[in-house]
Image (cartoon, coloured by chain):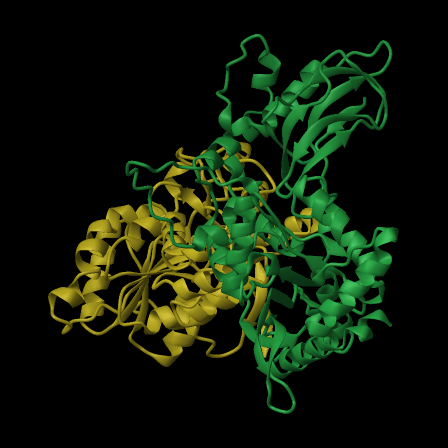
Chain colours: A yellow, B green
């Protein structure tokens, strides 16, 4: 059975599913309790599970993240909400120095089953201190898992997997898509990490993205089909660490051309990693250099028109695809 | 605009050399009048003017090699002037690789116009080219010669669509290019008393074709010895009686007729090895090897099995003499289905020949030798004999076909009256 739900409802459903199943699952964050969460993800959970399991915290990211790490080390399964991922920089020391390393430091004796979740990236006019995409930053550190679901079904399924994981998971939500709807499987639909999803099948070029850029790529694929008769395949990476190299390599072996799309800045980004993996594992199948489509190298603007200009557009993706197809000059 | 174009005078012809201009700039020419001598791989031909007028400009110099289809001269009608710029530029393109860019500062338009193509040409000139990794893999898998594919990507990069198009057209197969795969020849010793001679184009072409034939065609051989006393006396008698009519039959005329007639029963030997399969021919178009100073050419006697000896004889004489003068037309030395090579005049006791591809077989004819033999009662008698050796393509015919064919040739030569019916 599947029902149409919003991305927001899907996340909540996953947390409820696990809180019912396992008493050690607790929530921490600013305004997540009485107020129901700034983004209404935890709406109603305070009433349902009470203040011991849905814990309102002061504005003290480093403090409550550190507390959650300690709880995890002691056998609980905390879920921490960052009001936006930008604020996680305040807790970066705890996340990077402790959460990512404790299991390694302890020779495997101490696990950190912790989920840190919140909206990542922009698209809702919240300007530079609320908008940036931190997947490359956290993806850099061994010891952290980093995932970025885009469909409501994946939001639920991957949250189930994240909560059950014995390692710290950086759960990057598509904040701009909280209200979007999609079919969500009932019950336990846990989606394994490290497995990409073919969001659209195609034969001429592979568009690789994650998070809300997947939807952009799907629209660009439609445009390419209509305007140029080009059949584009769209790969939703879902999980950035672990990373599904095989899915990308398989697709590029079929299409011979690839465009990697990310909302974040170009330098040292996920798209660079994707391009490097393709040239490493599918070099003999490439007909053109891998193109990267990224955000502009500026702090995210507030004004809507400027914000739109600073992020990848459907047109930019389609044009990049045309370039790797040699339909357009570079 | 009556430009004179380098003609394509044979399927394999890609370029020709202007040996000599028979008319000079400014001279009047009329349609059909020879204006130049053109040398191809095989022959030297006179090029006739198609239009009348003033030979206004010669684009190609004597000794210059020009690709097929390129203009070599311009014939101006009344009041017309040669389009010097246009003709000049097109000529430049043909020689782009050897010309230094910017040598003609007075013609900025010509040097500025096609930078892209020039760059491509320049890359090819030093043997390098750009190709995507996919293209290089496809080239490996399909045995393609990428240097023969024009790239349409940035800076002339060869991309997938270029390879697919070339494959569709059936071009760029690397195996069509045998000489480069062969081991390089050793360098000259330069010892005293040696001279170095550049092989002629004809030598090169024959060399490549024969090398290809020996490498790719599995040859087998079958030799018979025919008694030819009866043939010699018949020939003497015929030549005496026909002398007034100017007929003089050679031994080779009889041999060619016999080879052609015998082929009627052996279609597998009158065949061509083609890309699609074995092409069998009802008609025997008999190629005869003619030695030239610089090599060899094989003019063709069409439908030799059905022509009387006197006609074969006359055609063979005409073709041979014109071959030696280099005056054969391409359609006179192309399209043979079977070859006879006769070295009888050189006192050769026996020899075997290399098949002339794509044909299936060739017969090598040796000298007539008078030697002692046994007659039916066991007495030693003098006898004239001739050895004939078949070389055949084992992919097309088998040994038994070859043996039966050669015994039929022998039967015909030993019963030469059969060649007169």
Residue drawn at (38%, 72%) of the image:
A161
Q: Nearer the viewer, residue B201 or A89?
A: B201
Q: Nearer the viewer, residue B89 or A108?
A: B89
Does residue B219 appear in this view?
yes
Residue drawn at (84%, 51%) of the image:
B246
The answer to whether B28 is drawn above or below residue B49 in the figure is: above
Q: In the visual, does B7 lie left or right of B117?
A: right
Q: In which image quadrant can residue B263 be found?
A: bottom right
Give coordinates of residue B74: x percent, y percent. 75, 20
Q: In which image quadrant can residue B388 be found?
A: bottom right
As drawn, the residue found furthest toward the left would be A106
As drawn, the residue found furthest toward the bottom would be B377
Q: Nearer the viewer, residue B181 or B389?
A: B389
Give coordinates of residue A222: x percent, y percent. 65, 52
Q: In which image quadrant can residue A98 be found?
A: bottom left
Residue drawn at (58%, 12%) of the image:
B108
């Amino acid at each position: 059975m599947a029902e149409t739900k919003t991305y927001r409802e899907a996340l909540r459903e996953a947390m409820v599913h696990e809180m019912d199943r396992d008493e050690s699952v607790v929530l921490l964050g600013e305004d997540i309790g009485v107020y129901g969460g700034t983004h209404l993800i935890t709406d109603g959970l305070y009433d349902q599970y009470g203040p011991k399991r849905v814990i309102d915290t002061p504005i003290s990211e480093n403090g409550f993240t550190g507390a959650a790490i300690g709880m995890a080390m002691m056998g609980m399964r905390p879920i921490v909400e960052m009001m936006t991922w930008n604020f996680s920089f305040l807790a970066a020391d705890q996340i990077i120095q402790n959460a990512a390393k404790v299991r390694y430091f302890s020779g495997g004796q101490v696990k950190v089953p912790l989920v840190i979740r919140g909206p990542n990236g922009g698209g809702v006019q919240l300007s530079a201190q609320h908008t940036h995409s931190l997947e490359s930053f956290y993806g850099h550190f061994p010891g952290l898992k980093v995932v970025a679901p885009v469909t409501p079904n994946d939001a639920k399924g991957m949250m189930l997997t994240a909560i059950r994981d014995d390692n710290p998971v950086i759960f990057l939500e598509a904040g701009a898509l909280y209200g979007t709807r999609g079919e969500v499987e009932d019950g336990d639909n846990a989606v394994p990490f490290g497995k990409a999803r073919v969001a659209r099948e195609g034969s001429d070029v592979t568009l690789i993205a994650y998070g809300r850029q997947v939807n952009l790529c799907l629209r660009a694929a439609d445009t390419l089909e209509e305007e140029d008769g080009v059949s584009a395949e769209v790969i939703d990476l879902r999980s950035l660490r672990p990373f599904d190299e095989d899915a990308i390599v398989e697709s590029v072996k079929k299409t011979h051309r690839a465009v990697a799309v990310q909302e974040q800045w170009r330098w040292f980004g996920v798209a660079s990693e994707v391009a490097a993996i393709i040239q490493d594992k599918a070099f003999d199948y490439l007909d053109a250099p891998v193109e990267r489509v990224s955000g502009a190298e500026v702090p995210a603007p507030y004004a809507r028109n400027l914000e739109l200009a600073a992020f990848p557009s459907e047109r930019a993706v389609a044009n990049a695809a045309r370039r790797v197809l040699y339909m357009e000059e570079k | 605009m009556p430009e004179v174009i380098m003609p394509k005078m044979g399927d394999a012809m890609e370029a020709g050399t202007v040996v000599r201009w028979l008319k000079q700039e400014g001279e009047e020419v009329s349609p059909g009048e020879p204006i130049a001598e053109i040398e191809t791989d095989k022959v030297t031909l006179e090029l006739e003017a198609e239009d009348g007028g003033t030979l206004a400009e010669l684009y190609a110099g004597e000794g210059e090699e020009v690709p097929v289809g390129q203009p070599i001269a311009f014939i101006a009608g009344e009041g017309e002037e040669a389009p010097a710029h246009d003709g000049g530029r097109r000529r430049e393109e043909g020689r782009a690789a050897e010309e230094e860019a910017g040598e003609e500062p007075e013609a900025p338009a010509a040097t500025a116009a096609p930078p892209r193509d020039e760059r491509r040409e320049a890359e090819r000139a030093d043997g390098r080219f750009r190709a995507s990794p996919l293209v290089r893999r496809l080239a490996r898998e399909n045995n393609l010669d990428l240097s023969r594919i024009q790239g349409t990507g940035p800076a002339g990069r060869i991309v997938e669509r270029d390879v697919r198009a070339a494959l569709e057209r059936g071009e760029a197969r690397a195996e069509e290019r045998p000489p480069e795969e062969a081991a390089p020849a050793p360098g000259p010793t330069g010892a005293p008393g040696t001279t170095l001679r550049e092989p002629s184009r004809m030598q090169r072409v024959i060399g490549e074709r024969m090398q290809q034939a020996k490498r790719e065609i599995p040859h087998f051989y079958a030799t018979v010895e025919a008694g030819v006393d009866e043939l010699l006396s018949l020939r003497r008698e015929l030549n005496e009686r026909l002398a007034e009519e100017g007929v003089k039959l050679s031994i080779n005329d009889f041999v060619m007729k016999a080879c052609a007639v015998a082929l009627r029963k052996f279609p597998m030997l009158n065949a061509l090895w083609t890309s699609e399969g074995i092409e069998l021919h009802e008609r025997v178009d008999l190629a005869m090897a003619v030695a030239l100073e610089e090599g060899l050419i094989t003019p063709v006697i069409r439908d030799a099995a059905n022509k009387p000896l006197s006609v074969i004889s006359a055609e063979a004489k005409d073709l041979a003499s014109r071959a030696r003068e280099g005056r054969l037309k391409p359609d006179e030395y192309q399209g043979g289905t079977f070859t006879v090579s006769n070295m009888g005049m050189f006192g050769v006791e026996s020899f075997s020949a290399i098949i002339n591809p794509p044909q299936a077989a060739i017969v090598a004819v040796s000298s007539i030798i008078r030697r002692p033999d046994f007659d039916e009662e066991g007495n030693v008698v003098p006898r004239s004999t001739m050895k004939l050796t078949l070389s055949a393509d084992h992919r097309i015919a088998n040994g038994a076909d070859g043996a039966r064919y050669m015994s039929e040739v022998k039967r015909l030569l030993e019963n030469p009256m059969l060649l007169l019916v």
